[in-house]
Image (spheres, grey):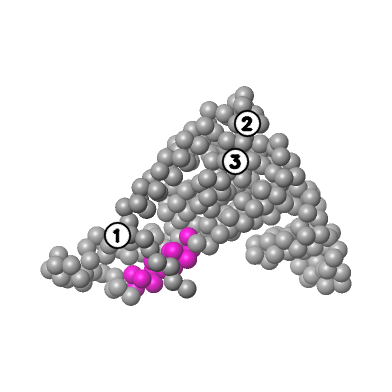
Amino acid sequence: MFFPKLRKRAKWVFAFLALVFALSFAFLGVGAGGSGIGDYISQLFHTQDTTGSTPSIEAAEAKVKKDPKDAKAQLELANAYQTENRTDDAIATLETYKKLKPNDQDALQQLASLYSAKAAAAEQQAQAIQASDSGAFFDNLLVSPSSKLGSALGQGQISGIEQQKIQKAFSDAQIQAAGAHSKEAAVWESLTKLDPENTDFLTALGVAKAQGGDLDGGIAAFEKVLVISPDDPNADRIKEFIKQLKQQKKAQAAATAGQPTATTGG
């Protein structure tokens, strides 16, 4: 098997989630301090089985070209791409495989992990932008050059145009991360439909939903875990997750209420 099953490592997922929740809400604001969870879940699955042999990309592509409906060939190609860290190609190939074998839970878990890895990479990119160009997020935001104080102090170290470019790159990375988490959540939803009582899948769904910005979806997934397994040894932790997600919802609602309605452009 290319990836270990989630159930074997579920306790570690809970332990890590507990740590992240205890430290901050950073994982809810994708890119604003880092996810951590996406990285961890990706590493949880991203362990290749070195006992087996993965064909070369060229050999696997030849098989797929010969018969695009050969599910085994598609899976081999996805594994070959992943071996070479070609995440986007591996994702696209697994999406094709999923259409041929929609009930393959192992492949779906692999696909979810790849979306998580893609999100983690985007989050790391956002963090790097924020860390290397902190002036674009703090210096020029604290004092506007057009204000009286800004005029008195002089132009900041970063020009307005540079600041906009940096902030756009940061925003683009955030959007990419949230989108990847949303696609990851969709895969976990497919898994929960195949195995509705699997609380491990539901836990991962809750995490992906929250990381993708769907706090209601995250809460619903965690609450379903409690319904299915009310005496779960991790029940108290899950309740704390739910509580903090609801607090985050209130904070977001309050922040939105205090701001003018934004208009969206094309």
In the rendered image of this protein, does residue 36 appear above or below residue 133? above
Q: Which residues are magenta?
A: 162-174
Residue picked out by circle 3: 221
The answer to which of marks 3 and 1 sits earlier in the sequence is 1
Mark in front: 2 vs 1: 2
Kindly state the secondary structure of the residue where label 3 is placed. helix
Q: In terms of depth relative to the viewer, which is nearer, 103 or 117?
A: 103
Report the amino acid beneath label 3. Answer: Ala
In the rendered image of this protein, does residue 41 appear above or below residue 261? above
Residues at marks 2 and 1 touching, judged by CB atoms closer than 8 Å: no
Residue at 44% from the left image edge and 45% from the top image edge: 249
Label 3 CA crowd tier, 10 Å (few <14, some 14–19, many 20+): many
Kindly state the secondary structure of the residue where label 2 is placed. helix
* Residue 132 in view, yes or no: no
From mark 3 to mark 1, how far is it between C-alphas?
A: 36 Å
In the rendered image of this protein, does residue 242 appear above or below residue 123? above
Residue picked out by circle 2: 227
Kindly state the secondary structure of the residue where label 1 is placed. loop
Residue picked out by circle 1: 138
